[in-house]
Image (cartoon, rainbow, N blue to C red):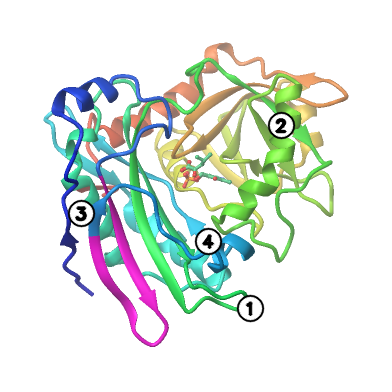
Amino acid sequence: MSVTFEISPNPSPRTDAEVAELVKDPGFGRYFTDHMAQIAWTKGQGWHSAKIVPYGPIALDPSAAVLHYGQEIFEGMKAYRHEDDSVWLFRPERNARRFQTSAARLMLPELPTDLFVDAARELVSIDARYVPPAAGEHSLYLRPFMIASEAFLGVRAAEEVTFYVIASPVGPYFAQGVTGVDIWVTDRWARAGIGGTGAAKCGGNYAASLIAQYEGYEHGCNQVMFIEASEKDRVEELGGMNVFLVGANGELVTPALTGTILDGITRDSILTVGESLGLKPEQRRLSASEVFSGIADGTFVEAFCCGTAAVISPISGFVTDKGEYRPQGQGFATTLQIRNAVLDVQYGRTPDEYGWLQRV
Ligand code: PLP
Ligand code: COI
């Protein structure tokens, strides 16, 4: 399915000097580019009216279903500038497929992969000057999302839906950089349950995680590690990231995909890259008690979290109301090795032997 995007240029874009200044220290998710992509869907008609329009407020009827019942999904992906100035997307078809899975769970229409990828490419092309220079971990973060825009208060799948892509130049997600984050571990709050929406990337999961996140802040932590709700011991993931433990003998352990956690694209890439670095990937059941005792007796020497926004960030410790567990590995050596290997592919500093990059 190939669609032509109708382009309405932004009549008052930022100047080149303003953009160059902004991409030097963009923070995360604070600034947006001049345009956004938009595609409408109507029951019976399918996808139509693909456009690139000036970035700006969305007019929604106050009865739009998304505002009441949260029928919404989103994605997160990045465009990277390479040394030769070319711009690349990383595994965008994986995001497209996950978006389809999320759509099916939320009773939203599935957007074909090529339309999803084309929308991202069109937006990155028109706003390419916002892709920061190849340095540090700066990139252009893309946020595709789909909302139930139909004006109707009955509880049913919306018959009018809108898909958008917005873009934001970003630096590191964690303001303190790659120095290690503390993680609050709680079984008081659950993020998702069996049969729920944990494997979908929908706004409600993030709203549900906030109370735990704020409890974590109160304990000096940056993120929360959620524990599965019924067993109360199985490790799931963080509010916006997957989690890995590094074993003393090169094991690279991450919770298996159980249907209650997100199938992270960074997670998947790390499993592949980790193997090529001689590590031993294990996707399996991981209990919180195993994490704590393994850190205490040196079975686990490092831990890290990973995601498109977070990249790969070392974990300095897991904090609970009973005590703290701090991996004793020196200088996050394995974590940084994996991090550099993945970033080297994303920024084109090493051959893309997996075919993960797509030039814009
Ligand atoms: N888990 C959750 C809850 C997330 O929000 C994210 C971020 O997208 C991830 C995991 C990591 O997924 P990915 O690596 O595809 O960004
Ligand atoms: C991403 O990594 O793309 C996410 O959606 C996670 C969020 C914490 C920003």
Q: Residue at x 53, y 53 (%)?
A: 263
Name which of mark 1 and mark 2 comes first in the sequence.
Answer: 1
Instruction: Looking at this view, name the residue that lies furthest to the top.
Output: 330
Q: Are marks 3 and 1 in contact (CB under 8 Å)?
A: no
- Quadrant in which the N terminus is drawn: bottom left
> Are there few (<14), some (14-19), or many (20+) residues within 10 Å of tag 4?
many
The answer to whether residue 44 is magenta is: yes
Boundaries of the magenta span: 35-51
Name which of mark 3 and mark 1 comes first in the sequence.
Answer: 3
The residues tagged by marks 3 and 1 sit, at their Cα atoms, a distance apart of 35 Å
- Residue type at mark 4 is Glu
The number of callouts visible is 4
For this view, does 311 lie left or right of residue 25? right
Which residue lies under the disc numbered 4?
72
Disc 3 C-beta below 8 A from ligand 2:
no
Which residue lies under the disc numbered 2?
214
Instruction: Looking at this view, name the residue that lies furthest to the right.
Output: 322
